[in-house]
Image (cartoon, rainbow, N blue to C red):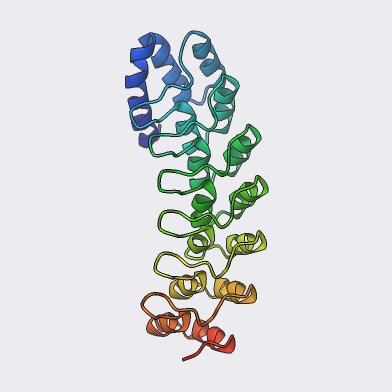
Amino acid sequence: MPSKIVIALFFFLVVCSVACGPDVNSQFIEAVENDDADKIREMLKSGADVNLQNEQGLSALVAMAMFDRVDVVDALLDAGAEVNSPDRLGRTALYWAAGGGHNDTVRLLVRRGADVTLMTRDQQTPLMQAASLGVPEVVEALLEAGAVVDQKDDQGRASLLRAVVGPSTETVQLLIDAGADVNMAGRVKETPLMLAAEEGHLETVKALLAAGADVNAKDMAEQTALKLATLLELPEIMEVLKKAGAEE
């Protein structure tokens, strides 16, 4: 049993024991840990509260979505788990599933009514999480379900700014194709092109340029993508940027 699951569900059990019989609750938690959908249904019928949360707002649904237990998530939803119920920081089961790159769980939650536009306290969305991780299948599922591609978090960064730092040019292209603004800058005026260049992601730099990225945009420190690539000694990226019209 992964230690993270045991720790998370231990705290869930502590709070749950106050609300209903300890035997029912202990069996419910055991069933969740063992991914035993039939046992979960049995314990819920015996009085366990499917929507009970611990002090951090952790519910069985959130825990199982976090760890990609698709069958258990489905069973909990069948038993009345609130699909959009957030934890104390506003993070839903969909947020955790997307952040883990759990494609099957994400698609199940979406089918069962998960709201892809809900934001956490710091204005993060499931799409931002998936974009940061660079899992194209999850990004595609969220976009198909209506995720807002240019929503910004409290740091002023939209999903594209997160994706360009990651390893997946395919994810970046999906966001571009969905209408992401390739010149939307963050809080310090950093653009997707600057971050991609700084990370040394040549194919992502090419994709952004092809989509109309401003090659001479400057951040608050007056740095351009070319200046960043030059400082980091990235000759291939420097060449591509110069051919695209970057000014020295």
- In the drawing, does residue 187 fall left or right of residue 101? left
Compared with 36, 238 (above or below) is: below
- In the drawing, does residue 145 fall left or right of residue 218? right
State the image coordinates of residue 87 (x, y, percent, origin top left): 41, 34
Compared with 176, 118 (above or below) is: above
Of 74 and 185, the residue lying toward us: 185
Of 46 and 119, the residue lying toward us: 119
Compared with 86, 169 (above or below) is: below
- Quarter of the rendering containing residue 186: bottom left
State the image coordinates of residue 176 (x, y, percent, origin top left): 63, 64
State the image coordinates of residue 227 (x, y, percent, origin top left): 42, 84
Q: Residue furthest bottom?
A: 248
Residue at the image point whose x is 43% and y is 70% from the top = 189
State the image coordinates of residue 73 (x, y, percent, origin top left): 55, 29
- Quarter of the rendering containing residue 29: top left
Residue at the image point whose x is 58% and y is 23% from the top = 75
User: Quadrant of the image for the N terminus?
Assistant: top left
Of 126 and 169, the residue lying toward us: 126
